[in-house]
Image: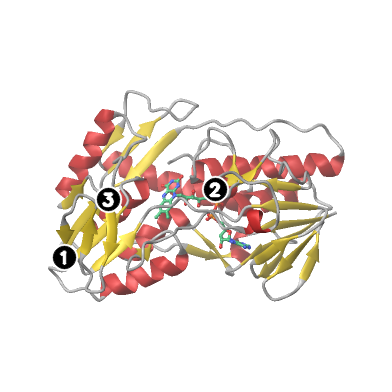
Amino acid sequence: MKVIVAGAGYAGTLAANRLAKKAPGAEITVVNPRPEFVERVRLHQRIAGTGRAATPLAEMLRAGIRTRQAAVEKIGDGCVMLDGGETLDFNYLVLAVGSTLAPLPGTVPVGTWEGAGQARAALAALPAGAAVTVVGAGPTGIETAAEIAHARPGLTVRLVGRDFAASLSAKARARVRTGLERLNVTVLDDTVTEVRDDGEVLLGSGGRLASDLALWAVIGAVPDLAARSGLEVDERGRALVDEYLRSTGDPRIVVAGDCAAVPGSRMSCQTAEPQGAHAADTVARMIQGRPLKPYSVDYVATCISLGRRDGVIQPSHRDDSPRRRFLAGRAAAMTKEGVVRGARFSARTGIGATGLPGSK
Ligand SMILES: Cc1cc2nc3c(=O)[nH]c(=O)nc-3n(C[C@H](O)[C@H](O)[C@H](O)COP(=O)(O)OP(=O)(O)OC[C@H]3O[C@@H](n4cnc5c(N)ncnc54)[C@H](O)[C@@H]3O)c2cc1C
């Protein structure tokens, strides 16, 4: 049986490694544009120069799993077309191409490897006193602003966005705000409508900010591969799936992670890894002719780092709604670091749904 895994992020890497254990006879090929596994949850560290975010795929994938450094251009009837023109046949496909960003012109996206590299170089070139504007007040924007302020205290850092830390309880949200204030990050409840050629940032409220670097930290788009290939997608372009994570348009295709439209789930590593595990199990069961098991969403916590020495861990109910209590400070920062290491460990070993990969 030939299985192709498109995308070697958290969902795809975990799925490939798990499938290699569960269906040892399968010929598994992982297709990914880069030869590395990119820890997206560390990209803000790559920008600020406080951590590494890439590991060679050869160190992440089990022996016997093949790799192709390419992007899947289109999914056809039992085959994929790669960007180099090659076609690969499959019996089953795990679609795990993640999410992407649609940055406002004049901003640098922080959620891609390339964007993070560009942001890192631009940041390194800024002199003390320069101003950085981070757009997006969700966890990615908060972590990015905090990491930069922690690493470069001489810079002026602002965070601009609506719905600040919306997934947290009111008290945890207030604690995140305090943590940012301690790092001298200014939080503006506003939108960015334009970034001018001279760097000036125009706000929805009519305000203007002189800025030397604007970073786009709003993750909401997904690659248009599924839509382009004629699969059924939702309004955001995520592939529609049945209860076993199979594409509603083609049951040979199992979808996991940010690019899967699973009701009640949000784009996160905590979602991608259990879905990657479930996708592998679904494929293994289809190969073996065994009954399939439905997937169910099960959240643990939202974890936000505020630089390297502070953070907030917000435990959640299974449906992702926040619990009353939360953890903050250095213990939370250490917990978050453990969670990030756990997520990488899970991807490498194929052990999913342990609760470890939990975080936002
Ligand atoms: C700065 C930052 C901090 C974050 N922090 C957290 C956090 O603390 N906790 C948390 O849970 N989440 C966090 N997230 C979100 C988390 O990173 C994503 O939700 C997670 O990476 C999704 O996993 P995935 O496997 O679906 O996609 P990805 O990890 O994005 O992997 C997708 C892979 O598919 C590849 N690909 C794309 N197109 C193609 C194609 N056409 N063909 C083949 N391969 C392709 C990509 O190159 C990539 O390797 C953070 C994100 C950012 C940017």
Query: As drawn, is 40 to the left or to the right of 194?
Result: right
Instruction: From this view, report whether residue 9 is shown above or below residue 168.
Output: below
Callout 2 secondary element = helix
Residue designated by label 2: 258
Name the spot of residue 163 as percent of width and height, x first: 31, 40
Of residue 87 and residue 39, the one placed in the foreground of this image is: 87
Residue designated by label 3: 191
Rendered residue at 68%/43% (across/down) = 279
Name the spot of residue 349 as percent of width and height, x first: 62, 49
Query: As drawn, is 316 to the left or to the right of 254?
Result: left
Q: Which of marks 2 and 3 is nearer the N terminus?
A: 3
Rendered residue at 37%/35% (across/down) = 167
Residue designated by label 1: 210
Q: How crowded is mark 3: few (under 14 residues within 10 Å), some or many (20 or more)?
A: some
Instruction: From this view, report whether residue 99 is shown above or below residue 315.
Output: below
Q: What residue type is labelled 1?
A: Ala
Q: What residue type is labelled 3?
A: Thr
Residue that lies at the very extreme toward the front in this rendered image: 206
Quadrant containing the C terminus is: top left
Name the spot of residue 311 as percent of width and height, x first: 29, 43
Q: For the residues labelled 2 and 3, say whether their Cβ atoms are less than 8 Å apart.
A: no
Distance of label 2 from label 3 (alpha carbons): 24 Å
Q: In which quarter of the image is residue 165?
A: top left
Tell me the tag on residue 336. Answer: none
Callout 1 secondary element = loop
Distance of label 2 from label 1 (alpha carbons): 34 Å
Q: Which amino acid does label 2 sit on?
A: Asp
Disc 2 versus disc 3: nearer the observer:
3
Of residue 40 and residue 133, the one placed in the foreground of this image is: 133
